[in-house]
Image: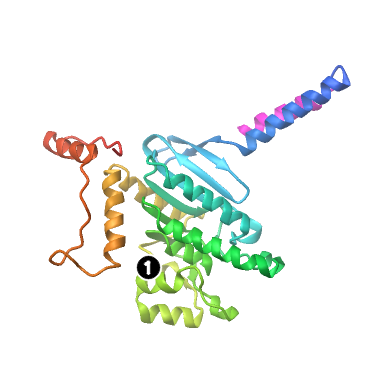
Amino acid sequence: MAVLVGCRLLLQAIRPQTGTIEAVRRLQEQTKSFHNVLNNKLQYIRPTSNGATRHYSSDIKDDLSIRYLDGEDSGIVVFGINRPKQKNAISKSLVIQMTEAVESVKKNSKVRTVIICSMVPGIFCAGADLKERAKMHQSEVGPFVSKARALISELGNLPMPTIAAIDGAALGGGLEMALSCDIRIASNNAKLGLTETKLAIIPGAGGTQRLPRAIGVALAKELIFAARAIDGTEAKRLGLVSHAVEQNKSGDAAYLRALDLAREFNPNGPIAIRMAKLAINQGIEVRLVHNGTFSISVIPTKDRLEGLAAFKEKRPPRFKGE
């Protein structure tokens, strides 16, 4: 709809105008308006499974789409990587845009779940953009790698649940990005692998730590040493992903399963979920304490009181993240 409105603006602008200066001024103003429509927040309509429609807003950038769902899905944010010609390879621009997006949701207490997916059919992320890397001056390579590593670390440190929806190939840095998420869902025909040893390098953004924690040390070594890529079904068997789903005709089966999972999280206390994530993440890093359990301070919240009241009154709780 936005594009059609923009086209009408341009058609009106190029019709003969009375007065050359006035025509040029109108053309400039309306072209600027069309540009803003395409690049600023747009309203989208997405069909749901029951035939209804769901609205959401989106920030459109060069390499990344950021969608804030609303209505019943309010609190779910979707990062969509969109570099079709480069197979969603990680570039300087993508690192900057994703870093800004991560910082934005980290500070937003209304965000309950972040889903990372691809806007490009058949690909999740092919790893580092080696063509861009080859053109970098040697002095640029180190800072870029550091920023990419920092991005993946920050993604892993987000306080809310994160889900990687893998509907295509996730290789090298692409799989490392997915590994930094709390939960991974893959289509059965997706390809996943840390294949860096084929290039005589090693995974450099946490893969050598996160993959062994996901599937065990021996299997992680085998996959990395062999530079082997496996499909989604095998990834599920090994424990690399939580769910492997049959790919659909539109190529977004993993995304739809991730969305269903985020909807399961949504009704529950957002502060409690964040604290549970913190307790799990910190708990696996330390020895068991307090008679065999790891504990964190319990902070009294309004949501906690609401949960108790709802249980007593036999009604659904109305959590506000407070």
Q: Residue furthest top?
A: 18
Per the picture, the main secondary structure of the magenta-coloured stretch is: helix
* Residue at point 59%, 59% (across, down): 88
In the displayed structure, would residue 50 be above or below residue 165?
Answer: above
Residue 2 shown in magenta = yes
Q: Is residue 83 visible?
A: no
* Residue at point 25%, 35% (across, down): 318
Q: Is residue 63 visible?
A: yes
Position of the C terminus by quadrant: top left
Q: Residue furthest front?
A: 139
x%, y% of residue 312?
A: 11, 36
Position of the N terminus by quadrant: top right
Across the whole image, how many numbered discs are drawn on residues? 1
In the displayed structure, would residue 72 be above or below residue 169?
Answer: above
Q: Which residue is mark 1?
A: 236
Q: Is residue 41 left or right of residue 134?
A: left
Residue 73 shown in magenta = no
Graded by Cα atoms within 10 Å as few (under 14), some (14 to 19) or many (20 or more), the crowding at tag 1 reads many
* Residue at point 13%, 33% (across, down): 313
**In the structure shown, which secondary structural element does the residue marked by tag 1 occupy?**
helix
In the displayed structure, would residue 37 be above or below residue 49?
Answer: above
x%, y% of residue 54?
A: 45, 36
Q: Is residue 280 left or right of residue 101?
A: left
Task: Please name the amino acid that badge 1 sits on.
Answer: Lys
x%, y% of residue 134?
A: 69, 69
x%, y% of residue 52?
A: 42, 35
Task: Using the image as rendered, state which of residue 94 and residue 144 is in the foreground.
Answer: 144
Q: Which residues are magenta?
A: 1-16
